[in-house]
Image (cartoon, rainbow, N blue to C red):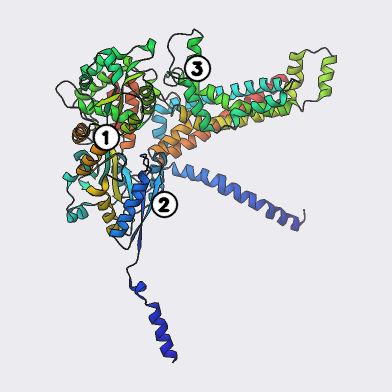
Amino acid sequence: MKKLLLAATMLAGLTPAAFAQETITLKFWDNQQTESGLSQYQKEAVKRFEAENPGIKIEVTTIPYPEFQQRLLTAVQGGNAPDVSTVDQIWQAAFAEAGAVAELDAQAKAAGVSPDTFFKGAWDSANYNGKLYGVPFNVDVWQFSFLNNALFKEAGIDPASITTFDGLKAAAEKLTDPAKGKYGVGLFGHKGEDTVVVMNSFIFSNGGKVLDENGKCALTSKESVGALEYLQSLVPFAPKGILNASSGDMRELFLNGSLGVEFWPALEQPTLQKSKIDWDFENGTAPSGKTPVGAYGGWNLVVYKSSPHQDAAWKFIQFLTREDVNGAVVDLIPANVKAAKTFLEANRKGADKIMTHLANAQPRPLSARYLEVSDIEVTLAQDVYSGANPAEAAKKACAAIDALD
Amino acid sequence: MLKRDRWLTWIFVTPAVLLVAVLMYYPMIGTVIESLYSTSFINPTPKFVGLAVYKKIFASADFGQIVWNSCIWTLAVVVLQNVFGFLCALLLNQKLPGQGLMRSLILLPWVLPGVVAAILWRFMYDPQLGLINSFLISAGFGDQGLAWLADSSTAMAAVVIAAVWKGFPFATIVYLAALQNVEEEQMEAARIDGAGPVRRLWHVVLPSMKEVIAINFILTTILTFNYFDMIWVLTRGGPQNSTHIFPTKIYELGFGQFRFGEAAGYGVVSIVVLALLITLYFLTQRGGRRAVA
C-alpha cells in the first residue's frame, strides 16, 4: 500500500504541466519613444508575439533617452544586461567592440534576412568590422529643411530653391530682418548630437566625410572644409546664440513664426501638424547639381551575449522588424523599407520625398570611439560658428580624432 | 581610563569609523586606484598604466582651461554669494515691517531644485525670447539681445550670476543667525563710545562673526567647486569650454564618453585643487590674524 501511495505521489508530480516546455521570459529594454499611444501598440505587439510563440514571455522596460545609454552600460558591466534592447546607431560599434552584443550573421543567414529589406544606411549602421551585430529597427534622417510658407510667400522665394547651397543662402539672406526679429535659417551649435548630425549632413552633401575607410579623420578634405565654410557663411542669417542653441530652441522660434527654415528629421512633422504654422519641407541642401545626403539617425535591435535565450531573442527581433509589425511599434520611421512606405503614407506628409532622402542618407562614422569623435565634432562646429578659419578648425579636429588611442 | 571604559569607547566609535571608512574613504581610494588603470566601456578589462592617465590629463589642452575656469567660478560665486548674503542678512536683521515674510521669500531661490533654477535662468537668458534682453532693449541698451550663454566672453559671468542668485539665501540665513548672536552689551558699549554704524560693523559685528564667516566660506567653496547642475543645464560647459569646470568635465568623460580612468584622474586632481584652495584660504586667514596682532 505504501509503495502504491509513493508511486501515486510521484505520478502526481509528473503532471502535463511538468512535461510542458519551460516558459522563457525575455527582458527587452527600449528607449522611451515619444509618439503618443505608441506604448499601447507595443503592448499589443508583445501580446501577439507571445501568442505566436507559446513559451516565450516578454518583459518590456522603457527608459528615457538621457538615461538609456547609462542604464545599458551599467547593466552590461554589472552582468545584468537584458536579453534584447534597442541601441542608438551611434552606440552600436562600441557595444560590438566591448563584446557586449552577439554576432547575428549566422542567424540572419539562416532566417534569410536580407540587407535589401532595410534602408542601406541603416543596415550599414548595424554592421561593424564586417560583421552583423544588430538589425535596424527604426530610422530617420537629419536634416530635412522645414520652411515657413507664409514667410517664403511674403519674401517671394521659391521653396524648392533651398535645396541648393546658393539657394538656401539667398533665401536666408532675404528672410533675415533682425529688427523685426525674423531670421532665415535656424543654426544650432550647442553640445549635443543634433549639432553633429546637421553639420555631417552638409559635409556628406558636399561629398565630404568625417572618417575615411581606414578610420582616419577626413574632415580636412576639400569637400568637408567647403561644407564648413558654407555653414559659416549662413551665420549672419541665423538667430543669435548659435553656440548654446539646440534644435529644440530653433523649433520654438519656427513655431512662433520668427524663423524661415529649421533643420529637423521627419520626426518633426507631428509637432508641425499640430501647430498653426503653414509649413512645408525639402530634402536637405547640396551644391547645385548634387543630391542632398542626410545623416542617419535611428535605433538597432541587439541581442546581448550574456543572454541565455539567444534563439528566443532572435525570434523577437525578427518579429519586431517584420513588415506587418515594424510600422506599429516605432515613432521614427520603420527601418523595414516596405513597412516604412506604408507608415509614411499613413502618417507623414510627402512620403515619396522622405523615402528618397532615406535612400540617399549615410550613417554617421561607424567607430567604436564615436562618442569621442562626436565631442570633437561639436568643438569643430563651435569653432566654425564662432568665426574660426574652417580649414584650421578642421585640422585641429583631425589632430584630436587621430590622436584617440 | 579603566580597561572596561576603553572597550566601551571602541564599541561606540567603531560604527562611526566603519561608516566613514565605507562611505568616504573606500570610494576615494577606489577613485585613486581607478585613475591608475585605463578602463573604458570598449576596453572593460582594467589595464594598469601607472601615472599615464595623469600625464595625458596634464598634457591636454583642456586641462589648464578647466583649472582656470574652476578657480574663477568658485572664487566669484563664493565671494559674491557671501557678500550679497551678508548684506541681505544685515537688512533682514533690522526691525522692518513685513520682516517675517521677507525672511521667508528670500529663501525661495535656495529651496528651488537646482535643475529647475537652471531652466528658469536659461529662459531668462534666451537671446530672442528672454526676459533679461527684453528688459535691456526696452531700457534702451541696444536694439538686439545678447546671447549671454552662447558667447565665450559672457557665458561664465552669466552662470556665476545664476549660481549666486541660487545660493545667496544660504549665506543670508547663516549670517542672520550669527548677527542675532552678537552681544547687545558690546554694541551698546560701542554706541556709548560714539562708534557709528560702520565702525560698529567693523569692530564689533565682524570680529564676533569671524568663525561663522570662515566656516561659511569653506562650506560654500566646497559646494560651489563641486556644483554641477547649474552649469550643465545652462551651457554643458560650453561654449568652447568657457564654462567647463571639474564636475562637468568628470561627468562628460565618465558618463558621456565612458573613459572611466581619465574621469577618475580628473576626480583626484579636483580633490587636490580643492584642498589647495581651502589651504590657501586658511593661510590668508592666518596671515590676516597675524597682521592684526
According to the picture, the residue beneath numbered tag 2 turns out to be: A78
Q: Quadrant of residue B171?
A: top right
Percent coordinates x, y for residue B225 in the rendering: 54, 30
Which is in the foreground here, disc 1 or disc 3?
Answer: 1
Q: Residues within 10 Å of mark 3 (few under 14, many from 20)?
A: some
Write down the residue under mark 3: B132
- Marks 1/3: CA distance? 39 Å
Residue count near mark 2 (Cα–Cα under 10 Å), binned few <14, some 14–19, many ≥20: few
- Marks 2 and 3 share the same chain: no
Disc 1 crowd, CA 10 A, few/some/many (<14, 14-19, 20+):
some
User: What amino acid type is highlighted by mark number 3?
Assistant: Ile
Asked if badge 2 and badge 1 are on a common chain, one would say: yes
Disc 2 on helix, strand or loop?
Answer: loop
Q: Which residue is mark 1?
A: A348
Residue A194 in the image, given as x and y percentages of width and height: 33, 30
Please name whichever residue, A210 or A240, is drawn nearer the observer in this view of the structure: A240
Q: Examine the rendered structure and indicate whether residue A113 appears above or below residue B236.
A: below
Look at the numbered discs 2 and 1 and tell me whether their residues touch, using CB distance below 8 Å: no
